[in-house]
Amino acid sequence: NSTHAIGCCLTAAPVAANQPTDPDKSCNDLLKEINYNQYLEARLVRESNHMQANNADYLAGDTFFMPLWATRYDPLTAQKTELKALQDRNANLTKLAVDKDC
């Protein structure tokens, strides 16, 4: 399954919660980024759910010949890290938008 082949190599690419240009963003830019981050969050959740289902099928069907990496590696760690970073980023952007009366 190709999901397992790429699942082992995923790395998190978390966004910084605060960025130096944040205070200079317009209300439109803030709200646009918040919406885009929400889209990314939803996509990560769908991917994580899909990966969990695939991994459960894989591990259930291959318990006798389970490779060692399958017992130690959590392929969802990258998604969890990125999701948390997006949530933190949106919390900061939302606070900034409220402070600017957007």
Image: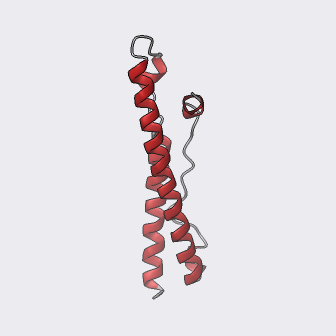
Residue farthest along the top direction in this orientation: 64
x and y, in percent, of residue 83 in the image: 46, 53
Q: Height in image: 11 above or below 4?
A: below
- Residue placed at 44% from the left, 46% from the top? 80
Q: Which residue occupies the foreground of this view, 46 or 24?
A: 46
Q: Which residue occupies the foreground of this view, 14 or 83?
A: 83
Q: Which residue occupies the foreground of this view, 37 or 100?
A: 37
Residue farthest along the bottom direction in this orientation: 101
- Residue placed at 45% from the left, 23% from the top? 70
Q: Quadrant location of residue 56?
A: top left
Q: Height in image: 43 above or below 6?
A: below
x and y, in percent, of residue 20 in the image: 59, 69
What scheme was used to colour the molecule? secondary structure
On-image quarter of the N terminus: top right
x and y, in percent, of residue 32 in the image: 57, 74
Q: How many marks?
A: 0
- Residue placed at 47% from the left, 80% from the top? 97
x and y, in percent, of residue 77 in the image: 45, 40
Q: Which residue occupies the foreground of this view, 55 or 86?
A: 55
Describe residue 30's horizontal placement relative to residue 92 as left or right.
right
Q: Height in image: 79 above or below 18?
A: above
- Residue placed at 39% from the left, 16% from the top? 63
